[in-house]
Image: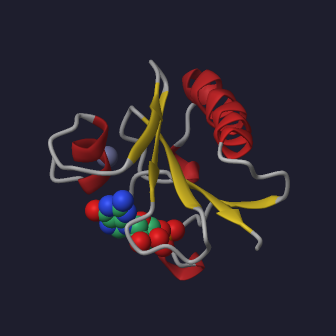
Amino acid sequence: MDCIFCKIVKKEILSKMEYQDEFCTVFHDINPRAKIHLLVVPNKHIATVNDMETADEPAFGRMLKVARDTAQKLGLNAYKLLISVGKEAGQEVFHVHLHVMSVS
Ligand code: 5GP
Ligand code: ZN
């Protein structure tokens, strides 16, 4: 499958990676819209939140925890979390990703 985020997860293409475990991967957005702009993705290819299955619940829970932990590791106390679901909502990459953006 030709998915850019799957390739980042498998380290087939380079990214500034912050964290990886058995469920998810965190890397810096290539076109940051905040001083710190991370993307947290499930290692499994899931196109959108609409495609999430019950079996994916642990991965989504881990994504939120890892977003919090990585934000704190980088010194953020306040930050925004965003997931766009579907093209009309602005989703451009069809592999679920949680944006973590600093506010200053
Ligand atoms: P979306 O608009 O789908 O919610 O967000 C996709 C995000 O992925 C954008 O902020 C974009 O800058 C980022 N992005 C797209 N391609 C790459 C890439 O190859 N590497 C990294 N690190 N980020 C990417
Ligand atoms: Zn993918």
Residue 21 seen: yes
38 left or right of 30 in image = right
Residue at image point 50% right, 54% down: 48
Residue 92 seen: no
Q: Which colouring convention does the figure follow?
A: secondary structure
> Splitting the image into 4 quarters, where does residue 102 fall?
bottom right
Q: Position of residue 7 (x, y in %)?
A: 21, 45
78 left or right of 76 in image = right
Residue that protrudes farthest toward the right in the picture: 78
> Splitting the image into 4 quarters, where does residue 36 fall?
bottom right
Q: Position of residue 66 (x, y in %)?
A: 64, 33
Residue at image point 44% right, 48% down: 27
Tell me the quadrant of the picture where the C terminus can be found: bottom right
Q: Position of residue 60 (x, y in %)?
A: 63, 34
Residue at image point 55% right, 40% down: 52
Q: Nearer the viewer, residue 101 or 58?
A: 101
Reply above or below: 22 against 68: above
Q: Nearer the viewer, residue 22 or 35?
A: 35
Q: How many numbered discs, if any?
A: 0
3 left or right of 65 in image = left
> Splitting the image into 4 quarters, where does residue 85 fall?
bottom right
Which quarter is ligand 1 in? bottom left
Residue that protrudes farthest toward the front in the picture: 75
Q: Nearer the viewer, residue 94 or 28?
A: 28
